[in-house]
Image (spheres, rainbow, N blue to C red):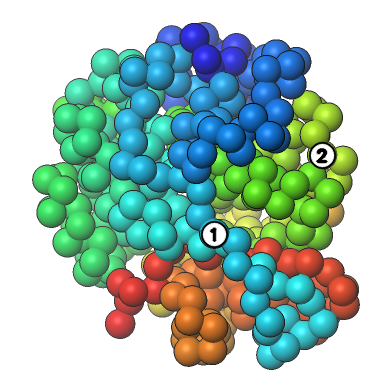
Amino acid sequence: MPSLLRHFECPGCHRTWSPREPATYCTGCERTLRSVYDLAAARDRLSLASLRARGPSLWRFQELLPILDPGNQVTLGEGETPILPVEEPRYAPGLTLLVKDDGLLPTGSFKARGMAVAVSRARELGIGTVMVPSAGNAGAALAAYARRASITARIYMPRDAPRSARDQVTAYGGTLRLVEGHIGDAGRIAREEAKGSGAFDISTLREPGRAEGKKTMGLEIAVALGPGSLPDAIVYPTGGGTGLLGMHHAFQELTEMGWIEKVPRLYAAQSSGCAPVVEALRKGRSRVEPVAHPETIAAGLRVPNPFSSEDILQAVRSTGGGGVAVPDPAILEATRWMASRHGISICREAGCALAGIRLLREEGTLDAGERVLLYNTGTGLVEG
Ligand SMILES: Cc1ncc(COP(=O)(O)O)c(C=O)c1O
Ligand SMILES: [Zn+2]
């Protein structure tokens, strides 16, 4: 059994769930579960060289993923994405900029990582139907992976979700339900309907698999660049916070295994029209305050009240990082700039992170000479 998963644990009350239980989240604490592995065994069995030698698949990290039987691993070939150095004096003056491009993953976004693992877990648990509320990309990824695993997928999206995501869901044979409002409204309706249908809820941070899949973002960065060459900072477009939590978990585990000494500072970039995480970080709050009227052209960032926000905020703070909010016009400009200037197609969400880097540099949060990684979470090809 290659997975070294010991159990799932609530970071609030420390209750544990065994690997074979259909664990979701801690309903008492309303918090996401942390996956706990035997890291001493991981240190003995793995090395950076052995991981590199396994090739580019996400499943090369199987010891640190929560799928017990490798036969249940569902794959569409997701795996290592490039880290591209970019000379960018306009948005990253004085910095060394690296762009990690997850737009190349199946279905065009980093959501493939989380869904590969969450759907594999559903298969391992013998679950026949899963559901998810989604701003777009998560739904597209779920539909594809669920089809690959012969599991039924119900996807709830805001009516104005990007056309490409809606089209992907139907193309992959998922059931698409469009709802009025934002992703929070979609989640409410999805959970009401799941009570009747029994569909398993794999909403952002309400089950452990998706964040563990996103953990491979951090693991990949460490394996590709090597422990001595990690970026000083990673700027990440933040909606539900899965990516931040996943990367943080990766760097924590690598620290505990003795592989890295310095963790990159994590920065959350959000649109000024919906910036609950950035606001909480800047105001020193321990939880987010929900945004009443979330508005932004970056669909994946329109998350007014992320679940388990205390964990997201703690993760960012523990790295010495922070947050930055960017107005929508600056998001669009930065998104277009990356394509027209560097030939790299980034999504609007990552355009937010790019514009955020400039603001963080201007305010002196990012220092001259630092190496900064811009995480491109999706392709820009799908947007008009
Ligand atoms: C392209 C893109 N980037 C970023 C996000 C934010 O994701 P999270 O903060 O949950 O990792 C999303 C979520 O929908 C997205 O689709
Ligand atoms: Zn708890």
- Tell me what residue is drawn at x 57 percent, y 22 percent: 63
Which of the numbered marks, if any, corresponds to residue 241? none
Q: Residues within 10 Å of mark 2 (few under 14, many from 20)?
A: some
Q: Is residue 333 visible?
A: yes
Image position of 352 (left or right of 232): left
Helix, strand or loop status at disc 1: loop
Q: How far separated are the C-alphas under marks 2 and 1?
A: 21 Å
Question: x, y percentage for residue 331?
Answer: 52, 81
Question: Which amino acid type corresponds to the residue marked 1 in the rendered image?
Answer: Pro
Image position of 102 (left or right of 320): left
Question: x, y percentage for residue 224?
Answer: 65, 49
- Tell me what residue is drawn at x 40 percent, y 14 percent: 69
Displayed quadrant of residue 14: top right
Which of the numbered marks, if any, corresponds to residue 82? 1
- Tell me what residue is drawn at x 59 percent, y 15 percent: 4
In the displayed structure, would residue 82 be above or below residue 258? Answer: below
Question: x, y percentage for residue 257?
Answer: 78, 26
Image position of 152 (left or right of 115): left
Identity of the residue furthest to the front in this view: 53
- Judging by the rendered image, the residue that carries numbered circle 2 is 260
In the displayed structure, would residue 114 be above or below residue 16? Answer: below
The residue nearer to you, when weighing 330 against 182, is: 330
- Tell me what residue is drawn at x 44 percent, y 25 percent: 24
In the displayed structure, would residue 67 be above or below residue 116? Answer: above
Question: Any atom of ligand 1 within 8 Å of the CB at mark 1?
Answer: no
Question: x, y percentage for residue 119?
Answer: 33, 32
Which comes sooner in the sequence, label 2 or label 1? 1
